[in-house]
Image: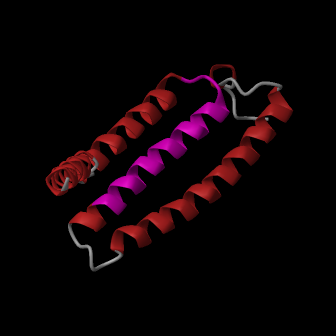
């Protein structure tokens, strides 16, 4: 009976170590996720006709950059918090950009009755 319990314990330890190996997230995983976010944001900026969608896509681009800063900070210089500090500054700028962008979008909608970028060709009011 003791041998069976010992064998089961060994199998459980091997299973846990295999799970830890599979769940080990490294720098390439973060870079791939950031690249995918950046590509989705770039696609949204270049193909969208709606001003609100363009603003959301710009936010995706900025979040991809933030992910890169934090990932490189964690793996290259883990004792310094430079990547996290830069990410906080970028988030602050992104929040201000969103506020100003939405105010401009509301003003454009009020004047032109549309937020379609291709229909707004004159910025003279």
Viewer-side residue, 48 vs 91: 91
- Nearest the eye: 45 or 72: 72
Q: Residue furthest bottom?
A: 79
Outermost residue toward the front? 1
Residue shown at 60%/40% (left/top)? 55
Q: Nearer the viewer, residue 79 or 9?
A: 9
Residue 65 vertical placement versus 91 (above, below): above
In the rendering, at what x and y percent does residue 41 appear? Answer: 46, 35
Q: Main secondary structure of the magenta part?
A: helix
Residue drawn at (39%, 52%), measured in percent from left and top?
A: 65
Is 20 displayed left or right of 96 in the figure?
Answer: left
* Residue pictured at 69% horizontal, 25% vertical: 120
Q: Is residue 117 above or below residue 38?
A: above
Q: Is residue 18 left or right of residue 92?
A: left
Quadrant where the image shows the C terminus? top right
Q: How far from the left and from the top, in percent, is residue 75?
A: 23, 64
Instruction: Compare residues 103 and 73 and report the one nearer the observer.
Output: 73
Q: Which image quadrant is residue 115 in?
A: top right
- 93 to the left or right of 116: left
Residue 92 colored magenta? no
Residue found at x 61% / y 32%: 53
User: What's drawn in magenta, residue-wise?
Assistant: 48-71
Specify whether 37 is left or right of 6.
right
Q: Position of residue 52 (x, y in %)?
A: 66, 34
Q: Is residue 54 magenta?
A: yes
- Give coordinates of residue 62: x percent, y percent: 46, 50
């Amino acid at each position: 009976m003791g041998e069976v319990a010992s064998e089961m314990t060994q199998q459980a330890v091997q299973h846990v170590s295999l799970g830890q190996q599979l769940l080990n997230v490294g720098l390439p995983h973060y870079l791939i996720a950031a690249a995918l976010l950046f590509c989705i944001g770039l696609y949204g900026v270049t193909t969208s006709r709606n001003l609100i969608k363009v603003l959301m896509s710009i936010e995706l681009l900025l979040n991809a950059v933030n992910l890169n800063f934090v990932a490189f900070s964690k793996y290259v210089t883990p004792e310094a918090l430079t990547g996290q500090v830069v990410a906080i500054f970028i988030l602050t700028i992104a929040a201000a950009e969103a506020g100003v962008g939405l105010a401009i979008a509301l003003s454009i909608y009020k004047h032109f009755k549309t937020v379609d970028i291709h229909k707004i060709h004159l910025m003279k009011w």
